[in-house]
Image (cartoon, rainbow, N blue to C red):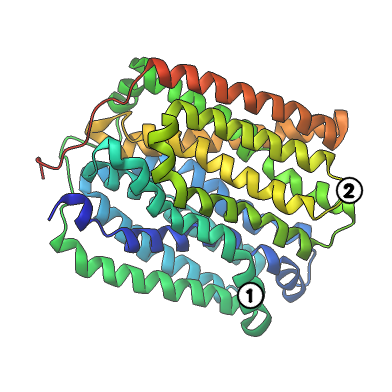
Amino acid sequence: MNAAAALPITLLATAAFLSSSGSRVIDPLLHVVASDFGTTVPAVSVIIAAFTLPYGLCQILLGPLGDRFGKLRVIALAMGAYALATGACAFAGSLSTLTVMRVFAGATSAAIIPIGMAYIADAVAYQDRQVTLSRYLNGIVLSQLLAGPIGGVFGQYLGWRGVFVLLAAGAIMVTVVMALRIPRLPDTRSAAAGFSLTAYRGLLRGRLPRLLLLGAFVDGVLLNGSFPFLAPYMHEAFGLSYAAVGMILSCFGLGALAYTRLVRRMIPIFGEPGLVVLGGIAIALGVGGAMLAGAWPVLILTQTAIGFGYFMLHGVLQARSTEMLPGARATGVSSFAFTLFAGQSAGALGMGALIAATGYRGAFAVDAVLVLGLGLWLRAMLTQHAPGGTASVANR
């Protein structure tokens, strides 16, 4: 049986689903948490940042651990710690305690998705990698589709504490299954790997890795950093309730899910350079359509287009990130994720300032034009730099 066939894709995708859900599942319940602690929604919104900030910052520290001690082992340990931290959130007696537990949950969750991608890259030749990664990313896509509704529905009957218990129980089950399966699966380890400047200098010495990290940063600025502002725009421009806005935003996941189903056919037709351009066009049309829409149902189509285009463009960059540092893939992929997060943070600040200066329509018009430029630049860069070879599992 070949390595790709032996990959525990479903298990890794489930871990990715639980990790990604930890960030979003509490969003519909902020008002309930605020009521329980006798405070305001803005005050409890700190529990969102408490998860996302350590998630981004810890990427650069946790990746080398996967290269040193084994990627599946680190994922399993991280999932176990994530389960404990998430379960502890359910028993928090104060907002400060809940915030601290969310910090631990975000920090441990950071090891799961990037290192999972690196594990897949170790086992799958590059020409098949984006298709395999798309199956893995189904877990993240489903979390974007379901985390909000799950949080809202279960929160209504179980309360916000029950939602954390449910999430922790799922993480515990995945941890147990991984612990049982790990001894039967190959898991590359390198005694020489670890957190050191040598690996990061290796990334910066290569021209293509430098360009990919720059692409990740710009991706974060223009895409991840701007998308959150679509929600308040929909609320203000169309008078939609936040519940309706949440349902429309979930259509991003529908577009992403459609891409994961079509990627196998699209890669041979368009190639990676074509995909990044088409992705940029789809995002720009989606953003532009949202700004020009005269009726809110149009937003369903625009949000679906944005999700489809985002995964088309971003999926190529993710696949290429697995080849930035073939001898220490977890370090390379985690560095990519860290740079993406840095861009997202910068983009959120920049987009906020641009909206304040020009309004939503002006800011998103600028963003749409720059996204088109990003797609064209990535096309030129990927055309010049072919994929750097294939992965091998012979050294396991």
Q: Quadrant of the C terminus?
A: top left
For disc 1, the neighbor class at 10 Å (few under 14, some 14 to 19, many from 20) is: many
Label 1: element kind: helix
The x and y percentages for residue 379 are 49, 22
Q: Vertical placement of 190 versus 205: above or below?
A: below
The x and y percentages for residue 344 are 60, 37
Q: Quadrant of the N terminus?
A: bottom left
Choose mark 2 or mark 1, whichever is in front: 2
- Measuring 49% from the left and 32% from the top, which residue is drawn there? 275
Residue 160's mark?
Answer: 1
Q: CA distance from mark 2 to mark 1?
A: 30 Å
Task: Look at the image and tell me whether residue 290 can be seen.
Answer: yes
Amino acid carrying label 2: it is Ala
Of the residues under marks 2 and 1, which one precedes in the sequence? Answer: 1
Q: Front-most of 193 and 321?
A: 321
Amino acid carrying label 1: it is Trp
Q: Front-most of 163 and 129?
A: 129
For disc 2, the neighbor class at 10 Å (few under 14, some 14 to 19, many from 20) is: some
Residue 213's mark?
Answer: none
- Measuring 26% from the left and 50% from the top, which residue is drawn there? 71
- The quadrant where residue 253 appears: bottom right
- Measuring 72% from the left and 54% from the top, which residue is drawn there? 300
Label 2: element kind: helix
- The quadrant where residue 335 appears: top left
> As drawn, which residue projects farthest toward the bottom?
157
The x and y percentages for residue 220 are 58, 34
Residue 237's mark?
Answer: 2
Q: Front-most of 36 and 125?
A: 125
Task: Look at the image and tell me whether residue 104 can be seen.
Answer: no
- Measuring 42% from the left and 73% from the top, which residue is drawn there? 170
